Every structure is written in C-alpha cells, then in structure tokens.
Image (cartoon, rainbow, N blue to C red):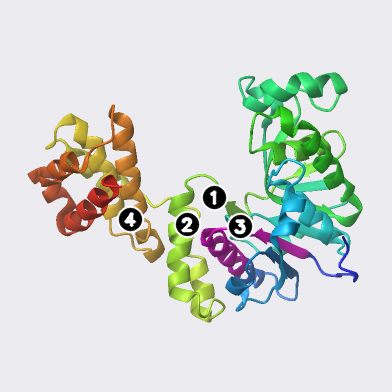
C-alpha cells in the first residue's frame, strides 16, 4: 500500500469522487486551507487528493492520485460500504507520512490547517467533534443493534464517547488503529441495519480506552447539517473564482463563506411575522420562510442562499399538509395581495421557481 517514498511534511488528505457537488466541496475546502495557511507563516504541508476525476484540481497545488472504479470497489469490500474507503486511504498515506489528517469534502477552514497537526500527538486521535456517550440514546439504531454484541466482549459500553469523523488525524505510529476500525466495520456491518454512520462508530470503538480523543470544531466547519445552504455559498464562490482560485480576491473572499446561517435581523423577522397576518393561517409560515431568502444580505455569498430558503419553505409547507401542494394551489397562494406585497420585486422569481418545482 506504500507509495514507495517517505513524505516528511504533514499530509492533508481528501477523498473525492462521484457527483460534481463533491468535487466542488473539495475544491473550496482545499482553497480555504491554503487561504488560512497564511496565518502560520513559514509552515508548510502537502495536500493529497484521491479522486476519480483530476480535472477539478488542475489549478490547485495538490498531488492528485487518480482512483479507478476497481480500486474504489476493492476498498469498499466485503459489503460495498463506501465509507470504509476513508480508513483505507488514510492507512495508505500513513504508510509513508509521519502524520496525516483526512478531511471530508463538506468542510472549510477558518484557522490554519497547521493547527490541526498541532493537535495530533502520539496516542491521540483527532476527530472533527467528540459526541455524546454511546448509551445516551438507547433508542439509537446502532445502540439497539450493536450494544448487545459489543458490551459482552468489552469493546464498548454506555460510557464510550462517540465521534464525528469529518476529520481523522493520526501519527504514523498509531495507524494500526485504522486496521482495527476496518476489521470492526467488516465484522459488524451485517448487524448495523444499514446505519451509514457505522464508519465513525467503529473508529470510536477502536479508539476506546486506547487513544486520547481530540476535536477541532474551532478550526474548521463541517457542514453536515443544513448542507444545501452551505453548498450554495460554496458554489457561488466557485462561479466567481474557479478560473483563478488562488488570486488575491479569491483568497480574500474565502472568509466571506462563513459558518453562519444567513438569517435576517430580528427586527426584520418581526416585520415578516406582522406581514404574514394578512394571509390565511395555513400560509403564514410559508411566507415567513420565503422572506429569509428575500432579505438583501450584505454578504454576497449569503445572498446566494436565497433559492435554498425558498425550496425549504415549499418543502416545509408540503410537510404541513396531508398531500403536496399542487401547482394550481401554489399559484393561488402567490396571487394573494398580501403575498405580492410582501415579496415585492422578488415575487415573480420566487413564484415561477416554486411552481416549476411543484410540477416535477
């Protein structure tokens, strides 16, 4: 599994394959790492990208390792569990590197990536976040299916801390932890009832009582929640900068793609609530949520989230009704004077977009 040569610098590792969205996420995460690397002058690292498509990374100072379908399939065996490949690729890098951190694509840095490596020490597993104890939610699918198997063997108990594996950082000497976690995945996958978080759970089991856990939520943002909003910000940055991703303006704009959800100020939200009183009760929440996308945010990348807010408003409205809103009903809602007045010059854009969505 070795590359056949020794890597002396810290290794920042990405595994990116599949739909264009994942490559877009990886591109921005890499640039955010490079932008914030300037906060630690004189420090350096290598960035390794394992991908089925090298093209998105051609303008970035990274080493791309092209993955063919056969390799990815082999990494996911014996059950085709694709998150298993995360541990496989990091194990491969650590065969040659003194220290490495695997970063999920749906992340971006707001501190220097060097700070990650300062938290990786012998006997320490760096993860994105340390979670609740295993036994804190007895109704959890993994607890119900695996606790009866793990506890009698002393592998896990109610006090074991869970973790989020958006970041996995290890010293070379601790790489056998990954062999253990891979073996656990292979053994317990048939019992996990399809829980896609089995990978990070097995990593926690492998580390339990053997490794010190450390986290890094203050160094980067892992947007596994509200993913579409953050993807909209990232895609807006790419539209603006993908042809020159390391230009001064591109690196400066990285800081504007921040971890805050774009919400109007409280006073505006109160105003939206008052405006919604002009509508029938079943339409008021719909309008208030539409207005989150209509607000003119000063940050251009927050403004890019508008269609996501509108989509979410329609999704929530459908969830509140016994059946999805048909386009005729939605058209009637948009023709109400209160709706027209509230949405102003964005009325036609919002209406046309959501009516088109409702016809799919």
Q: How crowded is mark 2: few (under 14 residues within 10 Å), some or many (20 or more)?
A: many
Position in image of residue 272 (x %, y %): 22, 43
Whether residue 181 appears in this view of the structure is yes
Disc 2 to disc 1: CB gap under 8 Å: yes
The residue pinned by badge 1 equals 223
- The mark lying in front, picked from 4 and 3, is 3
Dot 3 or dot 2: first in sequence order is: 3
Mark 1 lies on a secondary structure that is loop
Dot 4 or dot 3: first in sequence order is: 3
- The mark lying in front, picked from 2 and 1, is 2
Depth check, front residue: 34 or 71: 71
Mark 4 lies on a secondary structure that is helix
Stretch of the chain drawn in magenta: 11-32
The residue pinned by badge 2 equals 231
Quarter-wise, where is residue 277 in the image? top left
The residue pinned by badge 4 equals 306
């Amino acid at each position: 599994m070795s590359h056949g040569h020794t890597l002396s610098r810290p290794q920042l590792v990405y595994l990116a394959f599949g739909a264009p969205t994942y490559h877009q996420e990886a591109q921005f995460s890499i640039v955010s790492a490079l932008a914030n690397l300037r906060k630690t002058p004189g420090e350096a690292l290598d960035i390794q990208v394992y991908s089925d498509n090298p093209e998105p990374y051609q303008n970035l100072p990274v080493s791309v390792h092209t993955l063919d379908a056969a390799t990815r399939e082999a990494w996911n065996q014996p059950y085709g569990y694709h998150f298993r490949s995360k541990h496989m690729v990091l194990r491969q890098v650590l065969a040659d590197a003194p220290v490495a951190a695997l970063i999920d694509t749906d992340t971006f840095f707001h501190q220097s990536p060097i700070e990650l490596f300062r938290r990786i020490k012998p006997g320490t597993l760096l993860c994105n976040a340390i979670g609740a104890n295993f036994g804190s939610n007895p109704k959890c699918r993994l607890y119900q299916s695996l606790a009866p198997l793990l506890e009698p063997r002393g592998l896990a108990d109610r006090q074991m801390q869970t973790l989020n594996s958006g970041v996995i950082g290890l010293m070379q000497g601790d790489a056998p932890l990954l062999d253990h976690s891979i073996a656990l995945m292979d053994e317990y996958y048939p019992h996990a009832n399809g829980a896609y978080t089995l990978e990070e759970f097995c990593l926690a089991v492998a580390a339990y009582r053997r490794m010190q856990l450390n986290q890094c939520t203050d160094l980067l943002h892992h947007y596994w929640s509200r993913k579409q909003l953050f993807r909209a910000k990232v895609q807006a940055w790419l539209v603006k900068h993908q042809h020159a991703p390391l230009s001064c303006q591109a690196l400066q704009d990285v800081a504007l793609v921040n971890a805050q959800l774009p919400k109007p100020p409280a006073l505006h939200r109160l105003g939206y609530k008052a405006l919604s009183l002009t509508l029938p009760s079943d339409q008021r929440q719909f309008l208030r949520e539409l207005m989150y996308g209509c607000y003119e945010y000063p940050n251009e990348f927050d403004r890019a989230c508008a269609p996501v807010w509108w989509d979410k408003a329609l999704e929530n409205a459908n969830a509140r009704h016994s059946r999805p809103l048909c386009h005729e009903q939605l058209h009637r809602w948009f023709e109400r004077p209160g709706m027209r007045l509230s949405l102003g010059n964005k009325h036609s854009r919002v209406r046309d977009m959501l009516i088109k969505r409702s016809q799919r």
